[in-house]
Image (cartoon, grey):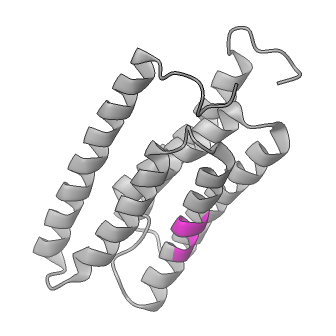
Amino acid sequence: MNTVERPARPGGTLVGIGLGMVFALGIAFTAYMLIGSWGGAYWIYTTAVAVVMCALALLRERRRLWTAAAGVAVAAVAVVVSLVADLPQEPSPPAALALAVLVGSSTRTLPALPAVAVAAGGAGVIALAWASGPTSVTVLATVPVLGGLVAGPLLRAFAPGRSDGE
């Protein structure tokens, strides 16, 4: 049975709703803060990146590998574009949280090789953010992604009923 055929668990649905609310509030707050500090239309780019990242994180149950790979790619491109175009630094806190969810979820559930690739990609995005300049945004991006890098393998190791063949 694949994830599309499996009925949604009530707990999983509630987690998805809660995560969606956190994402929406985070995106709105970040946009509000950018409007106040950067002015103009700078908030549009950060908001667009965060919306895409958060949507991928909420859709992670459908295709874990593809949503995680797309999330890592979007985050990496966003960091480079924000650096080159002199836009607010990426990943923003909501985008970093979405990246952490994608990395943690995939390292918990994917086979070993794809899980390691996604984890390396997430770490690479954070390294790229640090290379673009250490700021409070970089720290706010690093903390949740590190949490995902730690929590995913721990949950994988201690998952009840998990055999080595999964």
At 36% from the left edge and 55% from the top edge, which residue is drawn? 93
Q: Magenta region's main secondary structure?
A: helix
77 and 39: which is toward the camera: 77
Residue at far bottom of view: 85
14 and 1: which is toward the camera: 1
At 59% from the left edge and 38% from the top edge, which residue is drawn? 104
61 and 28: which is toward the camera: 61
Residue 76 part of the magenta segment: yes
* 13, above or below 141, in the image: above
Residue 129 part of the magenta segment: no
At 68% from the left edge and 30% from the top edge, which residue is drawn? 2
Image location (x, y in percent) of residue 147? 53, 38
- Tell me if I can see residue 14 in this picture: yes
Q: How many marks?
A: 0
* 110, above or below 88, in the image: above
Image location (x, y in percent) of residue 41? 20, 83
* Image quarter hosting the N terminus: top right
Left or right of 5 on screen, residue 44? left
Left or right of 1 on screen, residue 103? left
* 21, above or below 95, in the image: above
Residue at far front of view: 5
At 19% from the left edge and 57% from the top edge, which residue is drawn? 28
Q: Quadrant of residue 121?
A: bottom right
Magenta range is 73-77
